[in-house]
Amino acid sequence: MSEQSAAIRERAIAVKRAGARLAGLSYEDRATWIADAVSALTETAGEARKPLAASTGLSPEMVDWALQTTLETIDRASLRRLYRAATAGGDSPIEMLSVVLAGNLFTASVRAVLVPLLLGVPVLAKVSSRDGMFPAMLAEALHGADAELAKAIAFVSFRGGDDAMEAAFLELASAASVYGSNETVSAIEKRHPELPLIPHGHGLSAAYCGRDSLATDAAEETLRALALDVAAYDLRGCLSPQVVYVEAEAGSLVEVAERLGTLGLSTLAARLPRGPLPIEAGAAQTQWRGLAEATGVLVRGESFAIAVVAAPDLRWSPGYRNVSLVAIDGPEAAANALARLGSTLKCVGVDDASADRVRAALSAEQELSAYTCRLGTMQTPLLDAPADGKPVWHGLVR
C-alpha cells in the first residue's frame, strides 16, 4: 500500500472511530451541531465569494445567491422533519458512508454530507478536483461548532480511477454515495460489486407552464419564476430545466420566449450575471444556437438564448442559460415525451395551477420517478426533497 493510500485508510479509520460517538448522541445534539455550523457558515461565506467564483466559474453574485438559498433550507424545523421521516420505520443508521462528490454544483456537498451526519452516520468524502474550496469551508464550520464531533467527517482528494486509493477510500464503508457521471457510477460499481451503492448519476430536468399560468395576470410571475430556474447556477445543474413545455399554440411561442427574455432573463443578467463561458461550452453553444436558428426561431439576449422548437424532440441544451421552449397539448403529452429519459429525469418545475395535472401525468408513466416543485425553486430543493426518485435518506438506514 502506497503512502497516500495508507494516509486515506488512516483517515477512514479515524472517521469510523469518531462515528461511534456521533451515533451515540441524541438527535437534538447532532441537530444543534449542524445548525450551529450552518449559522457560522452563513455569516462567513460572503468573505469567500470571489475565490469561490473563481473556482466554480460562477459570478460572485450567483455564488452569493447559491449560498443563501442553500443554507437557508437548513434550520431546526427542516432537520427535525427530515430526522422524523427517516427514522419513522425504526431502522438503524449504517456504520459509515463514503461519498464521491461531483464538481458541477459546489453547494451539492451540503445535503450529501449533512443528511448522513444528522442521522448519526460518519462520512468520508472525496472532493472533486474542480471544487475543493467549499467542502473545506464546510469542514471548518463543522469543526468550529464542535471539534470532537467534526472528527466524524473528513474530506480527501485523489485522482479518480486510482484503484489503490479508491480501495482505501471505500474499504471501511458500509455504503458509498456516488455523485457524478453515469460512467463514474458504473466504474465504481464494477470495481466494488460487494459494496452497497447509492447512485446519483447524470440527471436532466424540465419545466412546464400551463395555459392558465400564461393567459392570466399571473403570467409575469410565472415567467420571472421560470427565468430564475434557467439562470440559477447558469443552467449547469441536474435540476436545471433544459427544456420548457408550454401549453400553448405553436404560433404564440415566440411571444412567450420574448417575454421570458425581457421580463426575466434580461433582468437577471444584471442581478445575477452569468459566469464566464468556457471554451468547450462556447463551442457547444455555437452549435446548439446554429441548429436552433436553422430549424426554428432563436430569441437571443446578452447572456442567454431561447430556442422555440417545433416538436417535443428533447433537444437538450449546452447549459449556460440556453433553453428550449416547446409547445405541447397538455401534461400527458409532456410526460410521454419525457418518458424515455426514465430515471435520468430528476425534477419537473411546474406552475401552481398545473401541479396536480402534471403530477398525475408523470405518475402514469412507469419509467419516471421525477418529483415536481414550484417554478422558481427547482435549484433550491428542501433538505428532505427526494433524490433520484427516492427519499434523500435512502441507503443510510437499514
Image (cartoon, rainbow, N blue to C red):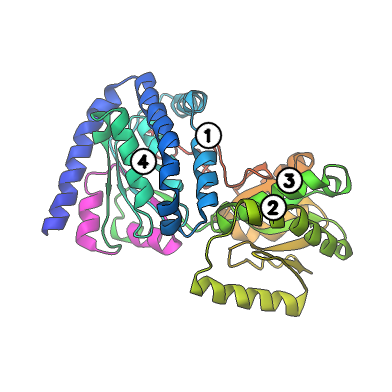
Q: Which residue is identified by label 2?
A: 227
Q: Which residue is identified by label 3?
A: 358
Q: CA distance from mark 1 to mark 2?
A: 21 Å
Specify the amino acid type for callout 1: Thr
Q: Closer to the camera, 205 or 109? A: 109
Q: Earlier in the sequence, mark 1 or mark 4?
A: 1
Specify the amino acid type for callout 2: Ala
Specify the amino acid type for callout 4: Leu
Q: Closer to the camera, 186 or 109? A: 109
Q: Which mark is residue 281?
A: none
Q: Earlier in the sequence, mark 1 or mark 2?
A: 1
Specify the amino acid type for callout 3: Val
Q: Which residue is identified by label 4?
A: 138
Q: Which residue is identified by label 1?
A: 73
Quadrant of the rendering where the N terminus is positioned:
bottom left
Q: Secondary structure at mark 1?
A: loop
Q: Secondary structure at mark 4?
A: helix
Q: Closer to the camera, 331 or 232? A: 232
**Residue 228 location (% of width, % of height):** 66, 49
Contact check, label 1 and label 4, Cβ < 8 Å: no
Which residues, given as a range, are shown in magenta?
161-188
Q: Earlier in the sequence, mark 3 or mark 4?
A: 4
Q: Earlier in the sequence, mark 3 or mark 1?
A: 1
| Few, some or many residues within 10 Å of mark 2 (<14, 14–19, 20+) | many
**Residue 235 location (% of width, % of height):** 59, 58
Contact check, label 1 and label 2, Cβ < 8 Å: no
Would residue 308 be seen by someone viewing this image from the given angle?
yes
Q: Residue at x 11, y 57 (%)?
A: 3
